[in-house]
Amino acid sequence: MEASYHSTVAAAKIQAPSAIEFRNVTMAYGTHTVLKDLDLAVQPGEKVTLIGPSGSGKTTVLRLAMTLEKPTGGDIRLFGESMLYGQDGQRLPARDEARMRRRCGMVFQQYNLFPHLTVLDNLILAPSTMRGEAKDKAAHRAMEYLRMVGLEEKKDSYPSQLSGGQQQRIAIARALVLRPEILLLDEITSALDPELAGEVLDVVRDVARETNVTLLIVTHEMRFAREVSDRIVVFEAGRIIEQGTSEKIFTNPSSDRTRAFLQSVLNH
Amino acid sequence: MKAVLEYWPALYQGLLTTIWVAMCSITGAAVGSLILGPLRMSSSRGVRLFALFIIEFIRGASALVALFWVFYSLPSMPHMPRLSPMVASILVLSLIGASYGAEIVRGGILAIPRGQLDASHALGLGKFRTLTKVVLPQALSQIVPSFAGLAADMVKWTSIVSFVGVRDLVYVGDSIRTATYETVSVYVVLGAIYWALCFICELIFQCVEHFLPLNKALRVTKCRSQPVPRAQMQTEGVKP
Amino acid sequence: MTWDWNFVFQILPDLLVGVWYTILITIGSAAIALIGGLLLAIFENVSTRAGRLVVRFFLGLFKGVPILVLLYFGYYLLPQFGLTLPAMAIGIAVLGLVYAAFCSEVYRGGLITIPAGLRDASVALGLSPYVMWRRVYVPLMIQRASPALINYVLTLFRQTSFLFAIGVPVLIGKAQVAGYQSFRYLEPFTVAGALYLALNIPFLFLLSRFKTKYA
């Protein structure tokens, strides 16, 4: 089943470039190697979830995609274009990097909302300053996304007045306002009390269902991962040990280590 | 004491001069810190070291030595201007204040959680915008209380300008002393005035703190279900 | 006016005497400041409400009034009470007291960050207050306060130049005398400035060592 999956992916590759592709990526901090020779391709519109034990490199994959870090080896391609090297093989100039970065958005575990700005200001800061959008137009669009996450009445509140779940939903809206083609979700419910996680996951389900944004998700919420994902990628110690559809991984994983990990996580 | 208080017009003039010098120097220092501080954190190593060198160089000699050098030695060098006592004093005090202030600004910027920088990066905000719209508005909540302490110190530093002929409180006090021989009273009065000036200076900065964006945001909160601990630390103003 | 090296060598011995005085005064004042500050911090911690108010008054006094004013006060006031101390002693005393006030705040800061659990542990081990302070608190306070304390000693060193106002032959005073006598101001102040800058270096070196050790 793995083989046929890969050939389907390979066929898709011939037709259109992957949304994001990691080629032989290695990431090391000093002597500690977090990712080893990673090959991973995500198709446009695909919803991919990365699971695995802590420290296995999943968050690093997202941070590399968002250019928050640069890999120590290998290449990362966004819609066919390298994010690290220019046409001439030299390091990509900052301006091109910034241009490509705009196609990605990220939501963080700690929400990272700007505490000194109201909710609305949080949403319109980037579009109005960096993309030259008129403030009222940006505000109008921002309200649409606030409606989408169900928090339009909070537009003049400050982040500190909101619950964690509300803050995270605002963070998702903030990322979506920029209309990214790829959305990176880094353990967005891990910092939340369990009863608040649900409202955030509902928003992500809506985004997955109603838009064709490519999603790259890192989460420990297995039920959610199973529901939302087209593909699950299992990490361990910086390598992919298995990948496949959520049905396959959750009901009949091929690898023993995947089995062991799922056992430990699902028995809470 | 009565004899001293008869000289109140002169004391008043001296007070105005002292206040003027203090206000100009503090303003100059604030502007200088906001320029030098971020330079110390530039991504270019050359700029960082250059800023560090300037800061340590200016701080290295005391205010008095620097003032004398600028006022007496500088004109001796070819093509260098002869500055008036007032201009020389304000220039020197501003520069020294800026070099101390730069460290305060740097400390405030360093205290911003990494997540804020990550979010700005993810949203595509450039370095300048990140600094001016995200980092500084929050960092000011820690910078302003510390800067208040520096400003109060600068009020005291103004006492040295009497040595280059500026007619500030110390200068006037000295003349009153020679005129009346009432040493104790003169310096008690001076001490009290300076103490009051420092106190008022701190009050002014506390008012400024009130209007900072992060502090305003946190005041609006009446009950928080998930507190923001780091931001709270910033408003409480950790003094170095 | 161009640089005259001969003049520099002429005044250098005088300037070096000034350096010597500066160093002496720094050491004397620093000793008073560091030890006095520690005692003040301990006293403030263990004393009653009244005692704390006295300390606060003392701190407010020495932190709110410029050093220059305090120097003049000491210099002109004490003879009226029959105490004619040499200017240098007054200078060291004033600097020492002012910086004792600053240092006590630093020690207090170090004290506050010591976890309450250590006090509980000391009580549980039956340590007397004296031993607790001497063997547990004070070493920790000094350790935590060290970087800030070194910074204050450095600032103190820079402010020794103020003592020239009451006639103490510190470096800047000597430079001014040299300039005044010869009407050449370029060399004395520049050399004095360079010497001051050079003397900063050992402090900065110590500071960077401490920062990496305790940061």
Image: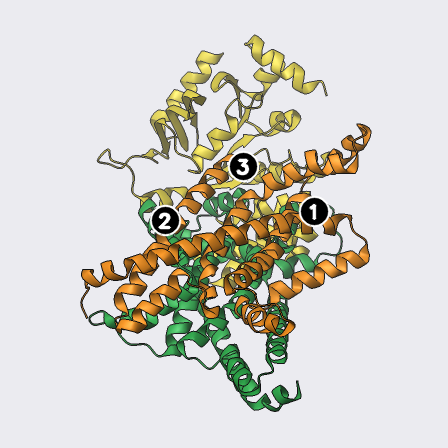
Chain colours: A yellow, B green, C orange
Cβ atoms under marks 2 and 3 closer than 8 Å:
no
Q: Is residue B23 above or below residue B213?
A: below
Q: Is residue B117 above or below residue B163?
A: above
Distance from disc 2 to disc 3, alpha carbons, whole Å, reads 23 Å
Amino acid type shown at disc 2: Arg
- Determine the residue positioned at 28% across, 37% down: A91
The residues tagged by marks 3 and 1 sit, at their Cα atoms, a distance apart of 30 Å
Q: Residue at x 34, y 45 (%)?
A: B45
Name the foreground residue: A67 vs B41.
B41
**Image vertical order of residue C103 relative to residue C162, above or below:** above
User: Residue B96's quadrant in the figure?
Assistant: bottom left
Residue with the mark numbered 3: C214
Chain containing the residue with disc 2: B
Q: Percent position (x, y) of residue C164?
A: 44, 66
Left or right: A69 in relation to A139: left
Q: Which secondary structure lies at badge 1?
A: loop
Please name the residue shown 60% across and 36% down the image: A188
Residue sitting at x 65%, y 54%:
B236
Tag 2 secondary structure: helix
Q: Check chain identity for marks 2 and 3: say if they share one.
A: no
In-front residue for pair B215/C188: C188
Point out the frontmost of discs 1 and 2: 2
Instruction: Name which residue type carries label 3.
Output: Tyr
Could you tell me how far apart the alpha carbons at marks 1 and 2 are, in whole angstroms? 35 Å
The residue beneath circle 1 is B227
